[in-house]
Amino acid sequence: MGRPGERRRTVWRGMMIGWALVVAVAGGLTLWMQDAAEPAGPYVWEQTDPDEPPDLPPCPTPEDAGTVACAYGTYTEND
């Protein structure tokens, strides 16, 4: 048999090496899964004209039975 406590140090060293391996593998998996979850490019800015009204579906007319009023309105500037 070796010196007292040698077995304990060997077990402790093995546990630390195992823990470091688990942390490294988990970090690699996290980075790999994070990259896979992002949407595909290309990423571009949409060009809009602030003076042009947005394309919205038409509001239902009062003749439509059972429909509610529009949930959006148009902005008009009063001078």
Image (tube, helix red, strand yellow):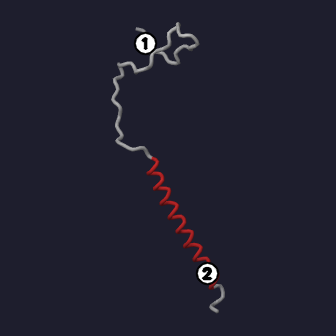
**Residue that extends furthest to the top in the rendered view of this protein:** 63
How crowded is the residue under tag 1: few (<14 C-alpha within 10 Å), some, or many (20+)? few
Task: Point out the residue furthest to the right here.
Answer: 4
Of residues 60 and 12, the one drawn nearer to the viewer in this rendering: 60
Quarter assignment of residue 4: bottom right
Residue 66 is situated, as x and y percent measured from the top left of the image, at 58, 13
Q: Quadrant of the N terminus?
A: bottom right
> Who's the residue at 53% across and 18% down the image?
71
Using the numbered discs, state the Cα–Cα distance from disc 2 to disc 1 in whole angstroms: 79 Å
**In terms of secondary structure, where does tag 2 sit?**
helix
Which class describes the residues within 10 Å of circle 2: few (<14), some (14-19), or many (20+)? few
Query: Given the image, on which type of amino acid does mark 1 rest?
Result: Thr
The residue lying at 52 percent from left, 68 percent from top is 21
Q: Quadrant of residue 5?
A: bottom right
Residue under label 1, please give it.
76
Q: Is residue 54 above or below residue 66?
A: below
Tag 2: amino acid = Arg
Kindly identify the residue that appears in the image at 45 percent across and 50 percent down. Answer: 36
Question: Which residue is label 2 attached to?
Answer: 9
Q: Tag 1, which secondary structure? A: loop
